[in-house]
Image: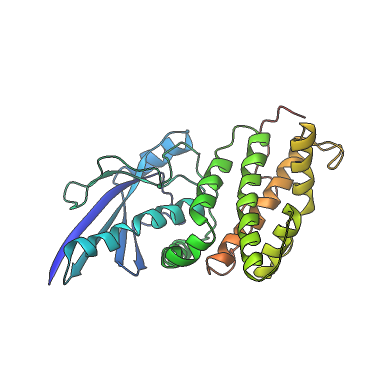
Amino acid sequence: MDSFYIGHRLTNLIIPGEPDALTIMTPAGSWELRKDSRYGEYKRAIAEGKIAETYMVEISCSYTGSRAAAMDAVDDELVPLCLAASYLTGLSVAPSRSLPASQIKFMQVGPHFPRPRAMGTGYPACPDDTSFARTVADFVAAYPTKGMDENIRLIAHHFLDALAFWSLEDLVLSTTTILEIIAISAKRVAGAQGQTIKHFTPRLAFAAARFNLPNLPADFRNMRNDLVHEGTLSGQKFPSKDASACGVAVAGALDWIDEYVFAAMGLGKPAQPRFIGEAFRGANSFSL
């Protein structure tokens, strides 16, 4: 029986509890996350709006038969592993460069991975490292089937775009894009069941019903309509609102998206809402 080793440095990963090491069990094997010796320094850099390599990810696998096929099976898990880590932390987690002994090395990191970017310290969805490891593992296992069916790669990338917002208007439009992706999936699933759903709101209602979720909060939908049709976050449908109220409305939509993604990927329920309340207090708005 032969074996191989793959290892890369990861940008911007801050795991709940900040363990020195963490194992994630996937169909391909055991991925080991190992904290960099300069983690404290790098975490401070991330908090200051920089990009830093906080963890290393490594895997050693034994195989029989085709070495290339075995390596491909492992390598295919790296994108969903990074997407899961990014989605669950609210940070852009991606390989930056390979470790010296790695038998697969990056010449250039491709566009399927999250783009390394400064995003602060994130919005963790998991309360501790144990739930983080379990949820990442479940995400990676579901990705080839449920992930493809639900356009999760596209959702995860736009989710990062939303959280890297530079204004409330930008945040609302990125969040709306995610909802449009979910609505299109709902249209496709309903069509396969012989139903024709022509409009955005009933499509999202169908998406909610698929997974026994509450409907998307009306405040966000009304704010989105005001922005698209009137050029302001607070118009006729969402009147007399300040930036704080608009931030609360978009937080409710992002929490709904969390519930949808967890359900669609078979991850259970989010441990807690991660955006409700004052998540976006102080955000800039140029239309109010």
Query: Where does the image place residue 178, in percent across and percent down from the top left?
Result: 61, 49
* 260 displayed left or right of 44: right
Furthest-left residue in this view = 1
Query: Where does the image place residue 142, in percent across and percent down from the top left?
Result: 45, 67
Q: Please name the residue shown 38% across and 46% down the image.
A: 94
Query: Where does the image place residue 6, in percent across and percent down from the top left?
Result: 23, 55
* 110 displayed left or right of 69: right
Residue 63 showing in the rendered view: yes
Q: Please name the residue shown 23% across and 64% down the image.
A: 69
Q: Please name the residue shown 17% across and 46% down the image.
A: 100
* 126 displayed left or right of 254: left
Residue 130 showing in the rendered view: no
Furthest-top residue in this view = 286
Q: Quadrant of the N terminus?
A: bottom left
Task: Examine the rendered structure and indicate whether residue 117 appears above or below residue 155.
Answer: above
Q: Please name the residue shown 46% across and 36% down the image.
A: 118
> Residue 210, located in which quarter of the rendered image?
bottom right
* 214 displayed left or right of 142: right
192 or 20, nearer to the observer = 192
Query: Where does the image place residue 58, in percent across and percent down from the top left?
Result: 27, 56
State how many labels appear. 0
Q: Quadrant of the C terminus?
A: top right
> Residue 29, located in which quarter of the rendered image?
bottom left
8 or 23, nearer to the observer = 8
